Amino acid sequence: MTISVTDARISDKGRLELQISAPATDVASLLDECEAELARAGGIAAGSTRDDLVARYGEERFEQLLVECLMDRIGTETLGASENPLVGFPQFFLVENGYPEGPLVFQVATYEMPKGTLSSAEPLEIGPEARVPSDEAVEKALASLMRTYMAQRVTNDDREVEYGDTVKVDVEVRAGGVPVSTFSRTASSMKVDYATMPKDFIDQVVGMRPGEEKDISFTVPAIEGICPEEHYDATVRVKALYYVDVPEPTTKWIQGKFPNLKGIDDLRAAMAQNIVQRAGGLPSKEDAIDAALFERLNVEIPDELVDFIVEGIKRGEAQRMHARGLGFEEFCAANETTPEQYHEKLREMAIRDLKLSIALDALYAMKGYSLNESDVDMIFEQMAPGRGMEMKHGYIMAGRLYQVEEMAQRAKARRWLDETAKLAK
């Protein structure tokens, strides 16, 4: 593919902007691949035609998605051939849409990874510090654990379906008359709540009875600036209600499932430790090492970079939400969080991941390490067990080997940290 970079600039904050142009002849060669990808994403059977895709998405939305897919393919190839140490989640902006006769010109923006220094490259000393979760958080986690062990069986109940029920259903979904597998299911168990299907769909299933069939229309809400509102038709058959049995955490049950625990107090303590680990506390060796490493790190991470990464993550997450039929508010409600809490959690994750990558890069340089072939091969084998060499060949051909070399460098520094860290007395 012939791709020309028509303009490139780096801002004083480290942001890299490229304008990339791809001729129509090369863009056309990617259309079949992109259309097949859109068919898979839209839950349309293999072998679908362009008319099927237009019926599924609507003409305007289909063209928008097709251009985005092309931009992503072209951008991946272009950035993959770059030797710049770029942060992930590049964002694409269409500048000129010549599709299908003319060229595509778009801007891709990303940031250079900030450089940091460590005050010392000596082995770390770590302590057993930890945060203590609230009783409410522990009980919530315990209830969630019990739900994972729940059992269900079909009942002969003949009452109206209520929110929170579990039902056996057949669902046939269509968009523009084209069958869509994304939301379709046959003789499947489905919980009637907003985390499993779009709210508009669930609200119309509530009140149906076993044996009843109903034609409905439902809407997947828009996510502003990312995904539009989408409309579907469906035929729903409620075949039966399920009885759901959530076990009680008795001493006998606990000892049967977790032989190393004596009773409910031990189980609550284990749940508390799990909460702390997931929240970034310091009971685990890995988390304690990271915290001690960050104390030695000297780096300035621009807020613009964190916001840039968070927006990239949110865009990808929003597209996955939309594919499940959820709007952003519905997603937050189903996960018992608020949009503000969700955004803050993503910021914390972005900052932590950035600091860890920067610190490991600095440690690798301070220790004077170098890579050998086996270091890189080990990463490929971890990424694709049994197919590591095949994947390596693909990365070499695409000019992307440097990405895995960065991963191997950080993995080497990480191993040294884990092996040499000392527990404080």
Image (cartoon, grey):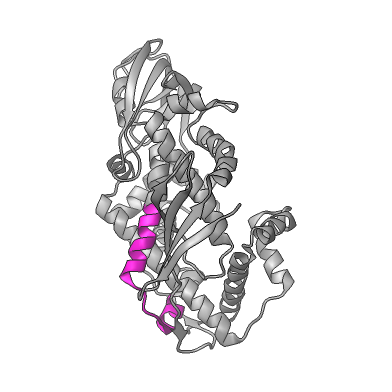
Q: In the drawing, does residue 61 fall left or right of residue 78?
A: left
In the image, residue 418 lies at what x, y percent?
57, 75
Q: For residue 418, say whether it is visible.
A: yes
Q: Nearer the viewer, residue 211 or 33?
A: 33
Q: Nearer the viewer, residue 172 or 416?
A: 172
In the image, residue 52 lies at what x, y percent?
49, 24
Q: For residue 260, say whether it is visible.
A: no
In the image, residue 3 lies at what x, y percent?
55, 56
For the image, the number of numbered tags is 0
Q: Nearer the viewer, residue 207 or 235?
A: 235
- The residue shown at (56%, 66%) is 82
- Magenta stretch encompasses residue 309: yes
- Magenta stretch encompasses residue 86: no
Q: With respect to residue 405, does 136 lie above or below?
A: above
In the image, residue 98 lies at what x, y percent?
44, 44
Task: Tell me the quarter of the picture where residue 116 sits.
Answer: bottom left
Q: With respect to residue 209, does 334 lie above or below?
A: below
- The residue shown at (57%, 69%) is 83
For the stretch drawn in magenta, the main secondary structure is helix
Q: Residue furthest front?
A: 102
Task: Tell me the quarter of the picture where residue 292 sits.
Answer: bottom left
**Which stretch is magenta?**
291-314
- The residue shown at (43%, 64%) is 110
